[in-house]
């Protein structure tokens, strides 16, 4: 594949954050200075969201610079005995820095690699794609396979003119354990078609185009003490993810697998430490919730006793009972606040990606009914 075709996908990737519309202009610095001034790596979630905005505004040097620093600083879990112990008595994540999930490490590499390609630094882009390959399968504190980033990696390698590396990712996508269910068969078949095409020496007749769909939904949680394998939490998304779709020319894959990583963050199989901490925090939270119960009961009983001693007509007792009841009713909120799980995540990411060889979105069957934005 000629190098000139390597720009089509990076140009398409410009709206990975879902914040930009229309054609992609040339690299420009407009608005980049403001983003740099706002970037504060001590606010890790805020910094990640700003990197999405920087990429959408074509601030590729900013993405490369701060993206590399985020990869280094947000990657490893640092254990502090005091913080880990103290976190039992306060909401999860209050004292500890956020650590990138495996899919976030991969997606950050996607943004950095695409930025290098936009700046025509092909060797650096390939180095970053190899780093992406490592991030997808390395066994760190946060780990796990990621079909979305494997798909993006395969397409980026093809656009970078290296079908052999792309074949590796298409093969991985076809054989990922998380995609072995019957409903994922179309995605596996699509990947298999690309493998056969590369093996037969056929280059894609048209360049890949990539579209983002929507924005990653907010994450809600509630307590669920029975029937849960995720501690005692029930994690849900405040919105639906698009269904997977494939056609002769393209494939649509949602980022629900990214949500699933967040939803299982407190399971024993994934994070034993967080799981143990959540169960230790449970009696502490129950104790906290008993405080307004005891205080409310004391106000009610004490007010009625004073009313009786003063030979009142019950007005003071009625006020005390009402006030005590209101105070006692806050107990569930106190319990939930004390047990709140750490569900922090990179918020400014799409809810799905569409890759297609169709020259126009209207010609891609998987785009029908899904308002996509060219990236």
Image (cartoon, rainbow, N blue to C red):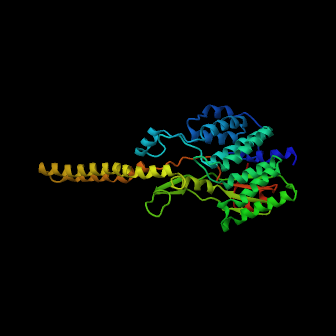
| Residue 72 seen in the current view | yes
Residue 355, horizontal then vertical, whole percent: 75, 55
Q: State the count of labels.
A: 0
In this image, 18 relative to 77: left or right? right
* Residue located 31% across and 51% down the image: 290
* Residue located 64% across and 32% down the image: 36
* Residue located 46% across and 39% down the image: 81
* Residue located 59% across and 35% down the image: 41
Query: Which sits in the foreground, 88 or 217?
Result: 88
Residue 15, horizontal then vertical, whole percent: 70, 46
In this image, 184 relative to 324: left or right? right
Query: Which sits in the foreground, 148 or 8?
Result: 148
Query: Which sits in the foreground, 87 or 53?
Result: 87
Quick one: which residue is furthest to the bottom in this view? 182
Residue 227, horizontal then vertical, whole percent: 47, 64
In this image, 339 relative to 210: left or right? left
Quadrant for residue 100, please give it: top right
Residue 239, horizontal then vertical, whole percent: 58, 57
Quadrant for residue 35, please give it: top right
| Residue 319 seen in the current view | no
């Amino acid at each position: 594949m000629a190098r000139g075709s390597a720009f089509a996908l990076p140009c398409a990737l410009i709206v990975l954050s879902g914040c930009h519309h229309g054609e992609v202009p040339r690299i420009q610095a407009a608005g980049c200075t403001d983003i740099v001034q706002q970037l504060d790596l001590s606010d890790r979630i805020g910094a990640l969201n700003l990197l999405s905005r920087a990429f959408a505004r074509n601030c590729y040097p900013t993405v490369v610079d701060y993206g590399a620093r985020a990869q280094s600083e947000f990657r490893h879990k640092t254990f502090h005995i005091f913080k880990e112990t103290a976190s039992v008595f306060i909401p999860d994540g209050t004292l500890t820095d956020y650590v990138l999930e495996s899919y976030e490490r991969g997606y950050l590499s996607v943004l950095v690699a695409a930025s290098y390609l936009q700046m025509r630094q092909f060797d650096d882009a390939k180095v970053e794609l190899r780093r992406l390959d490592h991030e997808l399968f390395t066994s760190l504190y946060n780990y796990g396979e990621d079909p979305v980033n494997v798909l993006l990696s395969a397409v980026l390698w093809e656009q970078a003119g290296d079908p052999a590396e792309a074949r590796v990712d298409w093969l991985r996508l076809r054989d990922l354990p998380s995609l072995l269910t019957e409903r994922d068969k179309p995605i596996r078949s699509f990947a298999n078609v690309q493998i056969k095409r590369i093996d037969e020496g056929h280059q894609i007749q048209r360049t890949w185009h990539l579209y983002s769909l929507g924005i990653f939904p907010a994450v809600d949680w509630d307590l669920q003490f029975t029937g849960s394998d995720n501690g005692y939490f029930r994690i849900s998304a405040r919105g639906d993810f698009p269904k997977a779709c494939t056609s002769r020319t393209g494939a649509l894959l949602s980022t629900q697998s990214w949500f699933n990583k967040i939803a299982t963050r407190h399971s024993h199989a994934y994070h034993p430490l967080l799981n143990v901490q959540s169960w230790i925090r449970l009696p502490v939270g129950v104790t906290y919730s008993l405080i307004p119960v005891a205080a409310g009961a004391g106000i009610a009983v004490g007010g009625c006793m004073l009313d009786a001693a003063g030979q009142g007509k019950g007005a003071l007792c009625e006020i005390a009972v009402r006030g005590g009841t209101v105070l006692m009713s806050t107990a569930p909120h106190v319990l939930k606040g004390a047990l709140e799980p750490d569900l922090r995540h990179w918020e400014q990411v799409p809810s799905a990606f569409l890759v297609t060889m169709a020259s126009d979105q209207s010609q891609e069957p998987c785009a029908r009914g899904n308002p996509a934005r060219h990236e």
